[in-house]
Image (spheres, grey):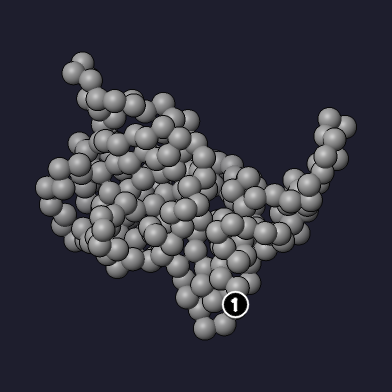
């Protein structure tokens, strides 16, 4: 969803989220943030974007497919570090609502989302697939979303957003990077098989199956060494 990803970067660069809040928290569902009043103006970013529910391709798009039935899609698997689903012909591909996805809330108009984002918490919310634009996932820090206030109180601000920044723009203060296992690699395919059939002595049953949202994608923060010479 390049339009949504680029708009979110632009909103961050403009400082749109400074002083706003994570104003909606539904236990086991989502944490949502942005401008609850819908009154804060934008500069060069957009408040309404065309829906990007799925990517349509002329030819089948290859993914690291999980074999087995899925209640929401003909095929599921992984593409470029994301959990995805597809139609039978593999010409429509979309990110699925696993825990920790980053998506854009909207009204009844499918093109009304642009500034109000949410992160899924708790369980997967697959029934939202292809109804809302998903454009990213949390690589680190889900524990902070889970610690947000559930309800507003008179004694403190309700989950205020101090700032939102693009990592590439703050290399002078944070030069860390994230390493994500390639989901088309043999190592990841082997990890899938290991998760489908657990060989540890504790396990009695081996289902030869794993749900797309139950398959973690190994991710780690790395700190590059600066060359000061």
Q: How many marks?
A: 1
Report x, y in % for residue 74.
60, 66
Along the viewing direction, whichever of 63 and 207 lies nearer the viewer: 207
Residue 45 visible somewhere in the drawing: no
- Residue drawn 82% across the image and 34% down it: 203
| Residue 216 drawn above or below residue 150 | below
List the single residue furthest toward the bottom.
58
Along the viewing direction, whichever of 109 and 159 lies nearer the viewer: 109
Along the viewing direction, whichever of 19 and 88 lies nearer the viewer: 88
| Residue 197 drawn above or below residue 80 | above
List the single residue furthest toward the front.
71
Report x, y in % for residue 99.
51, 43
List the single residue furthest toward the top.
155
- Residue drawn 42% across the image and 49% down it: 102
The kind of secondary structure element at disc 1 is loop
Residue 186 visible somewhere in the drawing: yes
| Residue 133 drawn above or below residue 17 | below
Quadrant containing the N terminus in the rendered view: bottom left
Report x, y in % for residue 65.
67, 63
List the single residue furthest toward the right.
201
- Residue drawn 63% across the image and 45% down it: 214
Dot 1: few (<14), some (14–19), or many (≥20) neighbours within 10 Å?
Answer: few
| Residue 88 drawn above or below residue 81 | below
Residue located beneath label 1 in the image: 89
In this picture, residue 136 sits left or right of residue 155: right
In this picture, residue 95 sits left or right of residue 69: left
């Amino acid at each position: 969803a390049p339009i949504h990803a680029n708009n979110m970067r632009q909103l961050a660069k403009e400082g749109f989220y400074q002083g706003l809040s994570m104003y909606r928290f539904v236990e086991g569902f989502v944490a949502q943030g942005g401008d609850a009043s819908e009154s804060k103006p934008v500069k060069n970013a957009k408040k309404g974007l065309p829906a990007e529910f799925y990517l349509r391709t002329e030819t089948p798009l290859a993914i690291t497919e999980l074999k087995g039935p899925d209640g929401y899609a003909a095929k599921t698997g992984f593409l470029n570090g994301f959990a995805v689903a597809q139609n039978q012909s593999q010409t429509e591909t979309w990110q699925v609502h696993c825990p920790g996805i980053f998506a854009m809330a909207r009204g009844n108009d499918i093109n009304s989302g642009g500034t109000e984002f949410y992160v899924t918490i708790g369980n997967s919310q697959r029934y939202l697939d292809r109804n809302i634009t998903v454009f990213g996932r949390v690589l680190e820090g889900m524990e902070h979303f889970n610690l947000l206030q559930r309800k507003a109180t008179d004694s403190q601000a309700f989950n205020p957003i101090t700032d939102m920044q693009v990592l590439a723009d703050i290399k002078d203060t944070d030069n860390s990077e994230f390493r994500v296992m390639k989901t088309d690699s043999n190592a990841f395919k082997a990890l899938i098989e290991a998760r489908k059939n657990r060989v540890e002595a504790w396990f009695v049953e081996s289902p030869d199956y794993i749900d797309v949202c139950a398959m973690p994608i190994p991710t780690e923060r790395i700190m590059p060494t600066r060359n000061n010479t």
